[in-house]
Amino acid sequence: MRIGIDIDDTISDTYEVVVAYAQKYTINELNKEAKLNDIIAQHHSYVAKMHNWNYDEEVNFWQKYYGEIIKNVKPFTFSVETINKLRDEGNKIVIVTARWPEPNWDVNELSRKWLKENNINYDDIVFNAQDKGKVAVEKKLDLLIDDSFQNCKSVADNGIKSFIIQTRINKGLEDKRITRVYSWPDIYNRIKEEKF
């Protein structure tokens, strides 16, 4: 089986790190209140909405902190073991990330280094995957595991199975074609139960 896996908030705890950096930026650099707006989001623009940033504030945040965030995220419990076990069992692992190029950071190199440092084995990697449905078709994926409802829906629209890993941001968004999962042990169990 060919399994596509997102990095941020799927393999790693990116939300926690992004919010910490965003709070620092909001308080120390924008001199704004540290209030967080409670939101549900279909994609990853949540940080700007949570902090009421305008476009320029959001761009400045990512230019300044994107690389630091990538370096400081940690793998979710059991994500590394599960991904490597799936690969050892003969599945092809394709990392499919929406991480985009940023002028101040070599995002591709930082991401590859992070995967290597955390001993995450994979067969292929796709960066700046803004249309994961298209990538899933091109890479002939059987399954995509992601935290973005928008990405999972795009994959499902192309007739490919998707698992959405539960986060604070996507809770409550539902589509009967998308399987909601809650942990890496749950993901492994569902892959074993599903018929692909």
Image (cartoon, helix red, strand yellow):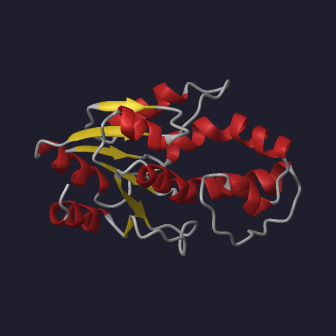
Image location (x, y in percent) of residue 145: 37, 53
Residue furthest to the right in view is: 31
150 to the left or right of 184: right
Tell me the residue at 62%/39% (across/down): 66
22 to the left or right of 180: right
91 to the left or right of 103: left
Quarter of the image where the C terminus is located: bottom left
Above or below 98: residue 17: below
Q: Quadrant of residue 100?
A: top right
Residue furthest to the bottom in view is: 172
Image location (x, y in percent) of residue 164: 42, 61
**Front-lying residue, 167 or 116:** 167
Above or below 76: residue 68: above
**Front-lying residue, 179 or 37:** 179
Image location (x, y in percent) of residue 194: 20, 63
Tell me the residue at 85%/65% (across/down): 33
- Please indicate, yes or no, whether residue 13 appears anywhere in the rendered image: no
Q: Quadrant of residue 93?
A: top left
Tell me the residue at 39%/64% (across/down): 177
Residue furthest to the left in view is: 89
Above or below 110: residue 164: below
Could you tell me how many numbered marks the image carries?
A: 0
Quarter of the image where the N terminus is located: top left
Image location (x, y in percent) of residue 110: 48, 30
- Please indicate, yes or no, whether residue 135 appears anywhere in the rendered image: yes
